[in-house]
Image (spheres, grey):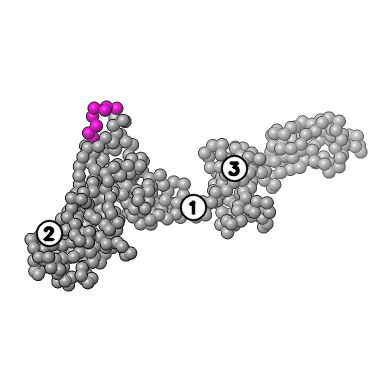
Amino acid sequence: MNRFLVGVCVFATTLLTASCGDSKHTDHGHDHNHDHSQEEAHGPRGGRILEDGELTAELKVYEAGTPPHFRIYLTKRGAPIPADRFETSVQLSRLGGVMENISFRPAGEFQESVQEIREPYSFQVQVSLNEDGKSHSWSFDSFEGRTTIPADVAERAGIRAEEVSSRVIKTKLPLRGKIVPSEHRIAHVIPRFPGMVREGRKHIGDEVEKGEVLAIVESNQSLQPFEVKSQIAGTVINGHLIVGEYVPENQWVYVVADLSEVWADFHLPLTERDSVKIGQTVEVCSGLDSNVITGNVSYIAPYADERTQSQLVRVVISNPDGRFVPGMFVTGDLVLSNEPARAAVRKSAIQSFRQWKVVFVNVGDTYEIRPLTLGRADDEWVEVISGIEPAARYVTDNSYTVKADILKSGASHDH
């Protein structure tokens, strides 16, 4: 059952005693909102008692097996008044000046609100009731999940806030793979004739130009030396020659690769095979630094690796600075979607509070929970489907400090 909290109880706290460096001054004017339910008058149904002369109303939030809503019971001199004999309206004022007008309808022995009452049950309440031509009104505060932290204390605690905004959410699938040379940019250097090596000029790792002489071989037929040249510019990735070595017909002596473009070969689990298509974006990182390069899927193997039950997915990567070298292990994020979200919050700002995922809205020196319904997420942002509106300020840095302060205050309600 829900029970309304009464008012705001103010007391001093020692939130940043250690960081302030002065144990003699622990009063920072830091207010908490406490549950004083034991000081309230409660009716037989656990609701809040509102009295005006001979008239007594019991108001509560009812949420057992139904969307939460207000119920109000009315008695006069102890006798129940039928629900169709009075009129009720309630106005709720939430943090930030959001007003909600709640209307009521008869429902047997009580009246119930037409509107659902959303969490948190934290608001200033104004109750208006008309019975037998007479008007009655009550007002009270019912706060939960709320605390007050002065601006200077918040600054010292590193509490920062920013506005909820629209963001582009990237949903990704992580992959692991390895860099290999592009087969479209490899040349196997083969002498025109078989013969004896007279000179080998290059070694693995050497850079060569197109047409550059790599070796001198003496023809086995004419006994005349001839030049062996590279067909492309690139890097020698395999091969070596020893003077006096015999090179048979059609035998390559060097492998030259243009590494300004390489392939990243990833292995996609077969359970995810429907997630990938040609042209899809993949963000690739070597793991040696935080730099990310974007490539596109150029090839999907039409068969599976029997041992790993995965499918080869190839990404073409521009590599002008040679940062990616063949044999290097890399990680990749396959971008599954890249769509705007009307409202998003930083993933680091989200905290668990009771059964919810929440952020803490900030209005002036006041902080309060906002339970969220969340949608898509990426590494930094989470889409908000409901619970907070664009442009609302919420805590982004050190939100756990605000959570701890609210929990210390004991600001909660019973279910």
Q: Position of residue 1 (x, y in %)?
A: 27, 58
371 is higher (above) or lower (below) than 285: below
Q: Quadrant of residue 364?
A: top left
Marking on residue 330 = 3
Distance between mark 2 and mark 1 Cα atoms:
55 Å
162 is higher (above) or lower (below) than 122: above
The amino acid pointed to by label 1 is Thr
Which residue range is magenta in the image?
Answer: 21-28
The amino acid pointed to by label 2 is Glu
The residue where tag 1 is placed is: 171
Q: Earlier in the sequence, mark 2 or mark 3?
A: 2
* Helix, strand or loop status at disc 2: strand
Q: Position of residue 63 (x, y in %)?
A: 29, 61
Q: Residue at x 44, y 54 (%)?
A: 376
Distance between mark 2 and mark 3 Cα atoms:
71 Å
Q: Residue at x 37, y 48 (%)?
A: 352
Q: Determine crowd level at label 1: few under 14, some 14-19, many 20+ residues with C-alpha closer than 10 A.
A: some
Q: Residue at x 17, y 55 (%)?
A: 41
* Helix, strand or loop status at disc 1: strand
Q: Residue at x 82, y 33 (%)?
A: 216
Q: Viewed as shown, does residue 77 lie left or right of 390?
A: left
Distance between mark 3 and mark 1 Cα atoms:
19 Å
Q: Is residue 26 magenta?
A: yes
Residue 211 visible here:
no
- Residue closest to the eye, 209 or 17: 17
The amino acid pointed to by label 3 is Val
Task: Say whether marks 3 and 1 touch (CB < 8 Å).
Answer: no
The residue where tag 2 is placed is: 51
Report the magenta stretch's main SS: loop
